[in-house]
Image (tube, rainbow, N blue to C red):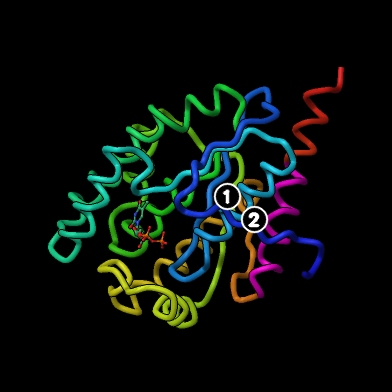
Amino acid sequence: MAGGVSWEPWPAGRLLVAEGRRLPRGFFITFEGPEGGGKSIQSRSLAAFLESQDFAVLWTREPGGTDLGREVRRLLFDFSSVLDPWAEVFLFLADRAQHVATKIRPALEQGFIVICDRFTDSTLAYQGYGRGLPLERLQALNALATGHLKPDLTLLLDVDVETGLRRRRSTEELNNFDRRSLEFHRRVRQGYLHLATQEPERWVLCRADASVDEVQQCIREAVMHRLQSLLQSATSP
Ligand code: TYD
């Protein structure tokens, strides 16, 4: 196993909350990127790793991190081919508002590391860059839905669009979002790269066309680096 990564992703059926050491103000990590970058498996593997380091961890995702969110997710997938772009935005935002209010913020307040597979930047990348809605409006709506909550760290798993979609097709059936045009997915990817350059202190890019272990190594290094600084500043007088 390259670089000493122990490969133990949290299985989908398992309770995704682990008790452990609490941080003074919690720590919020989001995973973003185009299709086929392996966010789901990589984010779960990070959760398992942090649990093994005795941190309190919550793993969750959007859309679908709450009971309401699971219904919203079903609506989004069932109606995706006919959804007006703003109707689509408001469905994602309804999911997000409920998710932040009932899961993410309470966990952060209790000192958990919260790992979320997709968050506000997905709306900017997909509905903004992808579907062409104005970014400033989407940013304002994101702020409204989240009460201005921002991730402490965002990991961008970047993969070129053809490779990502090919990978996706080899592991699961494509959903209606995946089936949008190549041009749409290219705009989404470019959008992510642009967002990452605008806030370099928040974003870390890991190339997702590397091996699964190498990608996980990149992720763990970025996370542990931030956590160590956080723990040091919390203990220094
Ligand atoms: P999902 O099956 O969860 O895919 P992935 O594994 O890529 O996360 O599908 C979620 C889809 O919803 C994905 O294509 C991205 C899209 N999405 C948006 O368009 N806007 C958003 O705000 C969010 C959270 C997701």
First in sequence: mark 2 or mark 1?
Answer: 1
Please name whichever residue, 19 or 81, is drawn nearer the observer in this view of the structure. Answer: 19
Label 2 CA crowd tier, 10 Å (few <14, some 14–19, many 20+): many
Cα gap from disc 2 to disc 1, whole angstroms: 6 Å
Would residue 129 appear left or right of 192 to someone viewing this image? left
Q: Residue 134: within the magenta?
A: no
Quadrant that contains the C terminus: top right
Q: Position of residue 135 (x, y in %)?
A: 36, 51
**Circles 2 and 1: CB atoms closer than 8 Å:** yes
Q: Looking at the rendered structure, which numbered label has been put on residue 154?
A: 1
Label 1 CA crowd tier, 10 Å (few <14, some 14–19, many 20+): many
Report the residue marked by disc 2: 204
- In this view, 140 is above or below 182: above
Please name whichever residue, 143 or 119, is drawn nearer the observer in this view of the structure. Answer: 119
Q: What is the magenta segment's predominant secondary structure?
A: helix
Q: Residue 225: within the magenta?
A: yes
Residue drawn 15% across the image and 59% down it? 79
- In this view, 215 is above or below 234: below
Residue drawn 20% across the image and 61% down it? 80
Q: Position of residue 155 (x, y in %)?
A: 59, 54
Residue drawn 45% across the image and 50% down it? 13
